[in-house]
């Protein structure tokens, strides 16, 4: 079982999370007011600090391919996590993006977010499958840009169906916590699980940092399943 944790904001917490057993560590390089977002420069610092320790994942909610490519060039992740509006970044555009990035970043993998809002997710996953390397099945919140960071679960039976149909690795996300990740894994049988909201430690002044105790508990529960 692979474990992915979002969102790292300092190199120190990223390295500590990797030491706790996390396989994939996510950063949010953006200026759109997303939860835990950081500058491209800070994201690159974290990516560099994690070399050889974990897979580095960088998220984009952008719809302009130039903007996505610029982020990849600046941050240099192992995995590009596309979680913008899939009506704007369509499968055909992901194909173009992949071709564009492949020359400079041949090892880059694309993790495509699928919004788990209803049965239409099955067809959406099928449409993206030829052009990406992995899926992340995530919940959507109207007050947060892009797919994910909603902090709530969705219909796991739909996620299970995508896992059954897809030839690609599938990460389950959306409201996963140390106390429900076991049930989620048993219900969906994903390749990996992801947590953002419920492995955070809120700060008095607003925002958050990662809670290493919660991350350790999440890792332990997922591995034990």
Image (cartoon, grey):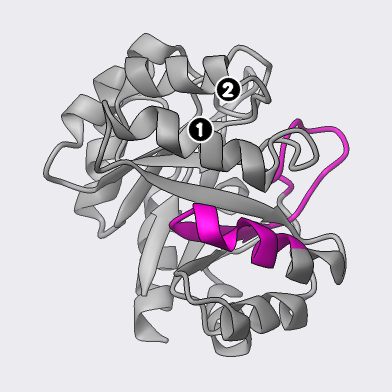
Q: What residue would you read off at disc 1?
A: 97
x, y (%) of residue 207? 61, 25
Are the two marked residues, 1 and 2, in contact with CB atoms closer than 8 angstroms? yes
x, y (%) of residue 208? 55, 30
x, y (%) of residue 175? 67, 59
Residue 179 falls left or right of residue 132 = right
x, y (%) of residue 144? 78, 33
What numbered label is drawn on residue 178?
Answer: none
Tell me the SS state at disc 1.
helix
Residue at coordinates 58% horizontally, 79% vertically from top-left? 163
Residue 186 falls left or right of residue 63 = left
User: As rendered, which of 172 and 202 lies closer to the eye?
Assistant: 172
Characterize the local packing of mark 1: few (<14), some (14-19) or many (20 or more) Cα atoms within 10 angstroms.
some
What numbered label is drawn on residue 65?
Answer: 2
Which quarter of the image is occupied by the C terminus?
bottom left
Task: Give the extent of the magenta segment.
Answer: 124-150
Please tell me how many numbered marks the rendered image carries. 2
Quadrant hosting residue 102: top left
Residue at coordinates 35% horizontally, 10% vertically from top-left? 41
Q: Is residue 196 visible?
A: yes
Tell me the SS state at disc 2.
helix
Please say whether residue 110 is one of the residues in the magenta stretch. Answer: no
Q: Going from the N terminus, do you reach mark 1 or mark 2 first?
A: 2
Characterize the local packing of mark 2: few (<14), some (14-19) or many (20 or more) Cα atoms within 10 angstroms.
some
Quadrant hosting residue 47: top left
- Marks 1 and 2 sit apart, C-alpha to C-alpha, by 7 Å
Residue at coordinates 44% horizontally, 14% vertically from top-left? 70
């Amino acid at each position: 079982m692979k474990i992915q944790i979002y969102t790292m904001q300092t190199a120190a917490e990223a390295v500590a999370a990797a030491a706790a057993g996390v396989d994939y560590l996510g950063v949010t390089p953006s200026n759109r007011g997303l939860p835990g977002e950081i500058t491209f420069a800070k994201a690159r610092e974290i990516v560099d600090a994690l070399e050889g320790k974990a897979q580095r994942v960088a998220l984009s909610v952008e719809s302009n391919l130039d903007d996505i490519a610029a982020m990849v060039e600046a941050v240099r992740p192992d995995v590009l996590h596309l979680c913008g509006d899939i009506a704007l970044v369509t499968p055909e555009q992901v194909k173009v993006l992949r071709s564009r990035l492949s020359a400079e970043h041949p090892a880059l993998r694309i993790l495509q977010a699928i919004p788990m809002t209803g049965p239409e997710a099955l067809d959406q996953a099928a449409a993206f499958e030829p052009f990406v390397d992995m899926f992340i099945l995530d919940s959507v919140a109207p007050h947060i840009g892009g797919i994910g960071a909603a902090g709530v679960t969705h219909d796991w039976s739909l996620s299970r169906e995508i896992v059954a149909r897809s030839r690609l690795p599938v990460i389950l996300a959306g409201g996963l916590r140390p106390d429900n990740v076991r049930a989620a894994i048993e219900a969906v049988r994903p390749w990996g699980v992801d947590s953002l909201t419920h492995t955070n430690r809120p700060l008095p002044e607003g925002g958050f940092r990662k809670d290493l105790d919660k991350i350790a508990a999440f890792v332990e529960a997922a591995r034990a399943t």
